[in-house]
Image: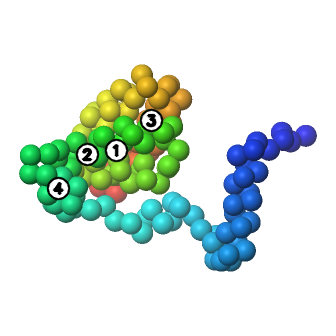
Amino acid sequence: MSDPKTPFELMMEQAQEMAKAFNPALSSFDPKGFEKMWPTMPKDAMEMWFGKGISKEGLDAKTRLLLTIAGLTMQGAQAETPFRMTVRHALEAGATKEEIAETIAQMSMFAGIPAMTRAMDMAKQVMEDKKDDET
């Protein structure tokens, strides 16, 4: 006997059916596949667009990306693709694995342990994938 579907699961099924009706190609859309098509920006480009290029006296790209990781963690780390992409970009911008982990851990005080655990798991996966890419 299977468990009844949650309202969220039912809503997701309806959204998928609607997407198929609008565009049949969307039935096979995989956000992780899209993620692989989106390259990580070079640190210099991130600094120009998201760092001190916006405000000469403002935050650098690394700090902005750590803040973005904090915000995404606060949302329960539900936006998986943007979260993973932000972790990759933060690493490219010079953030250490320890800084990323500390940023996520700090959010446990505000977002709760489940959100922190989910974010840590995704960040760890990105870091392991990055390590595999380097070998």
Which numbered dot is residue 54?
4
Q: Residue at x 43, y 38 (%)?
A: 73
Do the residues under discs 1 and 3 have CB atoms within 8 angstroms?
A: no
Other-residue count near label 4 (Cα within 10 Å), few / some / many at <14 / 14–19 / ≥20: some
Q: What element carries label 3?
A: helix
Q: Is mark 1 on a helix, strand or loop?
A: helix
Q: Would you name the residue on which mark 3 appears?
A: 74
2 vs 42: above or below: above
Q: Would you name the residue on which mark 1 appears?
A: 68
Do the residues under discs 4 and 2 have CB atoms within 8 angstroms?
A: no
Of mark 3 and mark 4, the one earlier in the sequence is: 4
Q: How far apart are marks 3 and 4 (CA)?
A: 25 Å
Which numbered dot is residue 64?
2
Do the residues under discs 1 and 2 have CB atoms within 8 angstroms?
A: yes
**Horizontal arrangement in the rendering, residue 85 relative to residue 43 (left or right):** right
Observer able to see residue 128: no
* Foreground of the two, 121 or 65: 65
Residue type, mark 2 in image: Arg
Q: How far apart are marks 1 and 2 (CA)?
A: 6 Å
Q: Which residue is drawn at 34% across and 44% down?
A: 68
Other-residue count near label 3 (Cα within 10 Å), few / some / many at <14 / 14–19 / ≥20: many
Residue type, mark 1 in image: Thr
